[in-house]
Amino acid sequence: QGQLVESGGGLVQPGGSLRVSCSASGFSWDILDYHAIGWFRQAPGKEREGVSCISTSDGTIYYADSVKGRFTISRDNAKKMVYLEMSSLKPEDTAVYYCAADAWGTCQRSARGGVGMDYWGKGTLVTVSS
């Protein structure tokens, strides 16, 4: 059975950088060829937030206003990986980061918090603290 697995989380100081990765494995098709991949985060006591997304259908890339100019999403279909490069990190970026796949192929559901996404990873914790 296919799964998404996040990695790369950890502790980083404010102003620092970190890259989290999402790997897709076990799918009987090239999931990244047909699914948009979104990155989400959820901090304790807060709602899940769609952070970024990269689509398949129209090449759209989405960033939440809170991360624009600081985060960069990229995809390597051959390696079945999606990356989220995070820079100028702030304490308020602290959260569990999840990746999820959307069979619609667009970033509409990612921009709305991810309700209805088809596959989810279990998350990786990013802590921004001095």
Image (cartoon, rainbow, N blue to C red):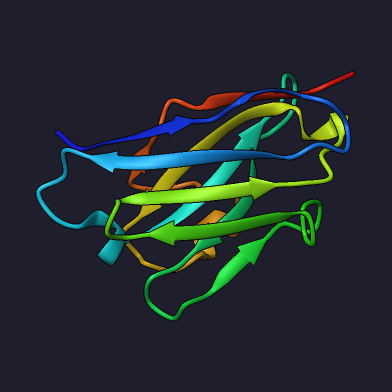
Residue extending furthest toward the left: 28
Residue 88 placed where, x, y %? 84, 45
Q: From the viewer's perspective, tell me whether residue 15 is left or right of residue 114.
A: right
Which image quadrant for residue 93? top right
Q: Dividing the image into 4 quarters, which one contains the C terminus?
A: top right
Residue 66 placed where, x, y %? 81, 51
Q: Dividing the image into 4 quarters, which one contains the N terminus?
A: top left
Q: 42 or 5: which is nearer to us?
A: 5
Residue 97 placed where, x, y %? 58, 33
Residue at image position (79%, 61%) is: 69
Which image quadrant for residue 47? top right
Which image quadrant for residue 26? top left
- How many numbered markers are drawn? 0
Q: 120 or 22: which is nearer to us?
A: 22
Residue at image position (48%, 40%) is: 21
Residue 98 placed where, x, y %? 52, 35
Residue extending furthest toward the bottom: 58
Residue at image position (54%, 30%) is: 8
Q: From the viewer's perspective, tell me whether residue 97 is left or right of residue 38.
A: right
Residue at image position (74%, 28%) is: 46
